[in-house]
Image (cartoon, coloured by chain):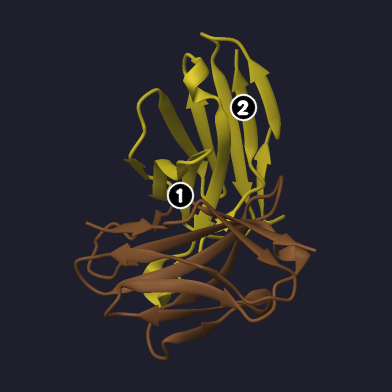
Chain colours: A yellow, B brown
Amino acid sequence: DADVTQTPRNRITKTGKRIMLECSQTKGHDRMYWYRQDPGLGLRLIYYSFDVKDINKGEISDGYSVSRQAQAKFSLSLESAIPNQTALYFCATSDSPSGATDTQYFGPGTRLTVL
Amino acid sequence: AQSVAQPEDQVNVAEGNPLTVKCTYSVSGNPYLFWYVQYPNRGLQFLLKYITGDNLVKGSYGFEAEFNKSQTSFHLKKPSALVSDSALYFCAVRDRAGGSYIPTFGRGTSLIVHP
């Protein structure tokens, strides 16, 4: 979905390096999410943010941190990358649940390889 | 607590035949249920959702899903499969009684449609 963009699309890095993945959205949504996808494990939630001042850990937040710089921007950082963080990372957005929509809109993904 | 299961890692079907991708869920209250599709090298795209009302939900690309409360299932169906339907399909659930408004995704089912 072009409304949610992720940079970079592919990244190869070395163990111990710091890396940042960036996500931007033009949908005007308050809620943003970071997931990782691993074969056979589906999508697992890393962090989520319901507005600029709200940051919450997901089920697998260890080794990751996030920054919500603005409503439209949500960055994911790996402070010291390790090989088992090799995965496909997705950013997603959704609007508030008051309208019972809850639909999530995903970016194209970032394929990260840690050597 | 909420959870979702997709019991089949892979579903194979011949083009023109009907297809079913299975999903079962567990919630403490009533569910919101979703299906998403992921084509190769793309992010997840929303297909359809059940919020309330008619148990048969129609979505994009000719897909439909039937909510069955007694069997806690939300199977995805299509009357006539196309080769272009080959993709990874994810079921997701959110408990209406939950306070976090975060959906839980299944592990995904790979659908392969043979010519």
Q: Quadrant of residue B71?
A: bottom left
Query: Left of B54 or right of it: where is A9?
Result: right
Secondary element under disc 2, as helix, strand or loop, is strand
Quickly name the residue at label 2: A112
The amino acid marked with disc number 2 is Leu
Toward the left, the furthest residue is: B28
Quickly name the residue at label 1: B107
Badge 2: residue crowd in 10 Å (few <14, some 14–19, many ≥20)? many
Q: Are marks 2 and 1 on the same chain?
A: no
- The spot of residue A48 in percent (x, y) is 40, 45
The Cα atoms of the two marked residues, 2 and 1, are separated by 20 Å
The amino acid marked with disc number 1 is Arg
Q: Is residue A4 above or below residue B26?
A: above
Query: In the depicted view, which residue is nearer to us: B92 or B97?
Result: B92
- The spot of residue B8 in percent (x, y) is 47, 56
Which residue sits at x=58%, y=65%? B46
Q: Chain of mark 2?
A: A
Query: In the depicted view, which residue is nearer to us: B43 or B79?
Result: B79
Toward the right, the furthest residue is: B115
Quarter of the N terminus of chain B within the rendering: bottom left
Query: In the depicted view, which residue is nearer to us: B28 or A75?
Result: B28
Which residue sits at x=30%, y=80%? B69
Quarter of the C terminus of chain B within the rendering: bottom right
Query: Left of A12 or right of it: where is A19?
Result: left
Which residue sits at x=52%, y=16%? A83
Query: Left of A100 or right of it: where is B64?
Result: right
Would residue A1 be seen by someone viewing this image from the given angle?
yes
Which residue sits at x=68%, y=57%? A1
Q: Is residue B101 above or below residue B70?
A: above
Query: Left of B17 or right of it: where is B76?
Result: left
